[in-house]
Amino acid sequence: MQGIYSMLNLILFGPPGAGKGTQSEKLISQYHLKHISTGDLLRAERQEGTELGIQANEYISKGELVPDAVVIGMVRNFMLSNTDAHGFIFDGFPRTIPQAEALDAMLTEFNAQIDVVLGLEVQEDELVKRLLLRGQTSGRADDQSEETIRTRFQEYQNKTLPIQGYYDQKSKYVGVHGIGEIDEIFSQLCEKIDALN
Ligand code: AMP
C-alpha cells in the first residue's frame, strides 16, 4: 500500500460552527480529495439504525465526544475502503490527542502523513449565533439547544484545542481568520495549501 496516500492529506480544524463542512466541500472539488467527516459518518450510522449509531447518539445528543476507539475504528475502515484516494481531508477528526496520535500512526502505516492542519479561527459568540441559525434548517438536534452547544464548546476547549499545540510543535498548524465571505476564506485556505508545494 506504499504511497497511496502520498498526495495531500489535510486536517480542517476549528470549533463547532467554524465552517469546516462548508470549506471542506469546496476544498474537495478543488484538490480532488476524499472527505472524511466523522460527524457525517456517525449521523449516517444513526440513520441506518446500527448499534454503533445508536450508542454514538447518546453522546452526540448531549454534545459530548464519542469514545476515541469508536471514531478511530470508523476512520480506519473508511481509509481502507478508499485506497484509491489522492488524499484525504479530515473534517471533525481528530478531536482528541489520542485520535491525533492514532491518525499519525495509521498514516505512517500507509507511508503517508498529515501535510497541513488548517485552523478556522472564529470566536465563541459568533459560533453560537451561527449554530443556532444552522439549527433552524440543519435538522440537527445538537444545533438547537444552547446548552448542548455550550457542552460542545467545553469539549472543544478541554479535549480538542490541545491538538493545535500538538501540530504546531510539528510546524504543521496554520491558522486562518474564519469570519467573512465564504469565497474569501476559501482562497486564503487555497493559498496556504498551494504554498506547500
Ligand atoms: P460534527 O458534525 O463534526 O459537528 O460532530 C457532531 C458530533 O459528533 C460531535 O459533537 C460529537 O458528539 C460527535 N463526533 C464527531 N466527530 C467526532 C470525533 N472525531 N470524536 C468524538 N466525537 C465526534
Image: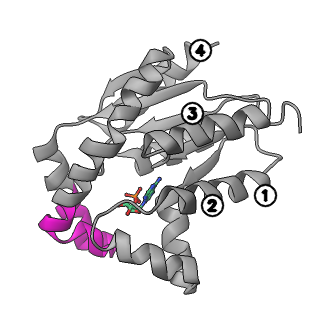
Residue at position x 13%, y 66% from top? 147
Q: Is residue 115 left or right of residue 147?
A: right
Residue at position x 40%, y 45% from top? 20
Q: Which residue is mark 1?
A: 81
Q: Is residue 164 left or right of residue 179?
A: right
Q: Are marks 4 and 1 in contact (CB under 8 Å)?
A: no
Q: Which amino acid type corresponds to the residue marked 1 in the rendered image?
A: Ser
Q: Secondary structure at mark 1?
A: loop
Instruction: Report the mark closest to the observer, 4 or 1.
Output: 1
Depicted 127 relative to depicted 177: above or below: below
Q: Which residue is mark 3?
A: 10
Q: Are marks 4 and 3 in contact (CB under 8 Å)?
A: no
Q: Which amino acid type corresponds to the residue marked 2 in the rendered image?
A: Met
Q: Which mark is residue 74?
A: 2
Could you tell me which quadrant the N terminus lies in?
top right
Q: CA distance from mark 4 to mark 1?
A: 27 Å
Q: Is residue 18 visible?
A: no
Q: CA distance from mark 2 to mark 1?
A: 11 Å
Q: Does residue 139 show up magenta in the picture?
A: yes
